[in-house]
Image (cartoon, rainbow, N blue to C red):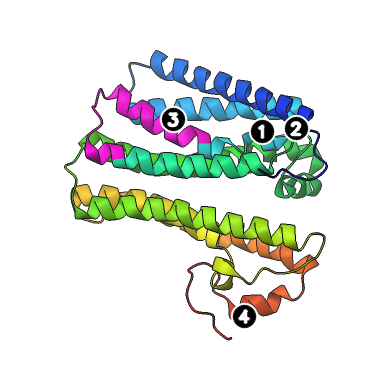
Amino acid sequence: MGFPRGMNMNTRNKSLIAMLFIYVFVVAIGTFLFLMLDQMSLIPRLLIADLAMTMITWIISLILKNASVYDPYWSVVPPLMILGVILFLNQTFSLSTFLLFTGVLIWGVRLTYNWLMRWTNFHDVDWRYNKIQDKSPKLYFLTNLLAIQLFPTLIVFIQLIVATKFIEQNPITNLVIWIGFVMMVFAAIIQFVADQQMKNFKKRTLNQKLCIEEGLWKYSRHPNYFGEITLWWGIYVMYFGTTMKVDLYIIPAILMTLMFLFVSIPWMEKKIIKTRPEYKDYQKNVSMLIPFLRYHK
């Protein structure tokens, strides 16, 4: 198992233990609040608990002066919320709900593992957060909340509404539901492979500003983001398998896709081009998202 070079393992371990206690505390508060709101319907209760957990995470990030305290939230909280919904509805793990939970859990474990391998300690801050802070230092406490923490929480929450509707119906498993589950597992595999390929490439080309053009990255500029989007579409496909008709619950997956297409990817590529001008040629030759044959050899 390889960790970032120059890392003080003692400091890292202490930071990880502290992060664990932070999230145990955050989830405990969210669970307590959810149980206290027993006069409300399920979705509003989940939303209030989710927002409360985000606010607590935000306050802690201000105290520690590190917005990256929120980073594990994206992958840790969704599987716990889905498990909580299943238990709250007193449902046994039917095959359909088991598939949904398993798909989200595999995705969450992989993403959390990837964060774990990259994160060093509480001095480690995502470069995007520093960028936001540099633009408006005096308002960073607010942009930290709105852009870094609240927005991701809400866009994931609306995906979880779709999952909750699926769980409520507790459908008999059919071919479409299986297809949705396979999409979710496929998404996690794509992300894992892409991450490993990038990790190996960076290790091999240490301190060199080079563009990766191998493995999945030869056919997609962002195979990891492709996997992320596929995960959320997989949940919708599973839900679609219960109704067999397109309804408003397709909107969350569309919004997630648009976020990556018009926010995450452009922001990332703009940063890359500043240090790797040759990336412009890579853009011309390789699909932005969906892996397929290169435009040019």
Which amino acid type is marked by label 2? Answer: Phe
Secondary structure at badge 4 equals helix
Which amino acid type is marked by label 1? Answer: Val
Ranked by sequence position, the earlier of labels 2 and 3 is 3
Secondary structure at badge 3 equals helix
Q: Residues within 10 Å of mark 3 (few under 14, many from 20)?
A: some
Q: Which mark is residue 284?
A: 4
Q: Residues within 10 Å of mark 1 (few under 14, many from 20)?
A: many
Which amino acid type is marked by label 3? Answer: Leu
Q: Which residue in the protein does label 1 denote?
A: 69
User: Where is residue 161, by image quadrant?
Assistant: top left
At horizontal 38% and vertical 33% (from top left) the residue drawn is 82
Q: Position of residue 169 (x, y in %)?
A: 21, 37
Q: Is residue 250 visible?
A: no
Cα gap from disc 1 to disc 3, whole angstroms: 18 Å
Secondary structure at badge 2 equals loop
Q: Is residue 218 visible?
A: yes
Cα gap from disc 2 to disc 3, whole angstroms: 24 Å
Cα gap from disc 2 to disc 4, whole angstroms: 38 Å
Q: Which mark is residue 80?
A: 3
Ranked by sequence position, the earlier of labels 2 and 4 is 2
Which amino acid type is marked by label 4? Answer: Lys
Ranked by sequence position, the earlier of labels 4 and 3 is 3
Cα gap from disc 4 to disc 1, whole angstroms: 36 Å
